[in-house]
Image (spheres, helix red, strand yellow):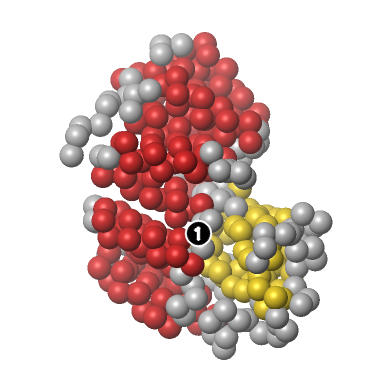
Amino acid sequence: MRERPRPHLLASAVVAFCLLLVGPAYAQVGRIGGEVLDEGGKPIRGAVVTAENPNAVPSKFTSKTDDRGRFSMAGLKFGRWIVTVEAAGFVPAQAASSIDSLGRNPPLTIKLARGAGGGIGGGVAGVNTEELQKELAAADALFTGKQYDEALAAYRTILQKVPALTVINLQIAAVHRQKKEWDQALAAYQEVLKGDSANERATIGIGMTYLEKGDYAAAETTLQAAAQTPGATREVFYNLGEVKFAKADADEAAKWYQKASETDPSWGKPIFKLGLVALNKGDKEGATAFMEKVITADPTSVEAAQAKAVIEQLKK
């Protein structure tokens, strides 16, 4: 594997310091949103979206889609949530989603097939949601505890029970990435795409796996292609910026971080990275301006806490 370019020492030292200051106190609740579409890609208005996690308090959130098929829920505690979508004239669908960052998490796109409805379809009929949630939580605990082989076995058992939940392959891929089993991770992401070719998390995962593998060209090609598709989101732009940054191409990285920020001006993550790009260039004044912008745009985020620490360091 090729050695990755090292970032500017000033940026590295400042960020390392900030990470020591940002602790679990900030990792509390987040929000999730997305869209509900029919098989032809048209938005479904008035679909009822329910997120459930019996290990959280409150354990249930409900939202309805608007005219553009969009929904949003805030205040969800970190962890695994089962998302159920129901709409008149459509077969209900179910998916698993992780809340793992403050503010907005990667958006969900859920497609419903036309049918009579009445109970969860798509291969998950009769599934006990509470029992499934417990199994997912146990598997996640194994993953968090770095018991990777045990976590893999647990996730695969769940997938065998509920084959329709192909998104479980996202977690399987994450375990393989921790074990540096790049090819197995890529294969797991491809399994997600077989059932949902538009799954952005899988596409991003493929790009970042290539990056971790040291194949910068494949990482760049994957995310560059995703960035050119209609409806490409902030997550694609941000992660393409990460690839460019890893290649020490600061100007190109800034371009994609900026695009991610323009897509969602309230998201502090790309603004913070723009500050790091400025630090890499030795531009302390520019870095400070970006850090102040993070605090204004996304005040409750981890990046805002880091930005405050960066500003304090730069003042010394």
Where 48 falls versus 199 (above or below)? below
Question: In this orientation, does residue 20 appear?
Answer: no
Answer left or right for 68 relative to 276.
Answer: right
Q: Where is residue 193 in the image (x, y as percent from the top left)?
A: 45, 61
Where 204 falls versus 54 (above or below)? above
Q: Where is residue 220 in the image (x, y as percent from the top left)?
A: 38, 37
Residue sticking out furthest to the left:
1
At 51% across and 25% down in the image, what residue appears? 255
At 41% across and 13% down in the image, what residue appears? 281
Where 140 falls versus 264 (above or below)? below
Where 9 falls versus 259 (above or below)? above
Question: In this orientation, does residue 6 appear?
Answer: yes
Give the mark count: 1
Residue sticking out furthest to the bottom:
126
Name the image quarter holding the N terminus. top left
Residues packed near mark 1 inside 10 Å, few (<14), some (14 to 19) or many (20 plus):
few
Please identify the quarter of the rendering in which residue 50 is found: bottom right
Q: Where is residue 12 in the image (x, y as percent from the top left)?
A: 34, 26
> In the image, what residue type sits under mark 1?
Ser
At 60% across and 57% down in the image, what residue appears? 108
Q: In this view of the protein, which residue sits in the foreground, 8 or 263? A: 263
At 45% across and 24% down in the image, what residue appears? 252
Q: What residue does disc 1 label?
A: 197
Q: In the structure shown, which secondary structural element does the residue marked by tag 1 occupy?
A: loop
Residue sticking out furthest to the front:
40
Name the image quarter holding the C terminus. top left
Q: Where is residue 134 in the image (x, y as percent from the top left)?
A: 47, 77
Answer left or right for 171 relative to 268.
Answer: left
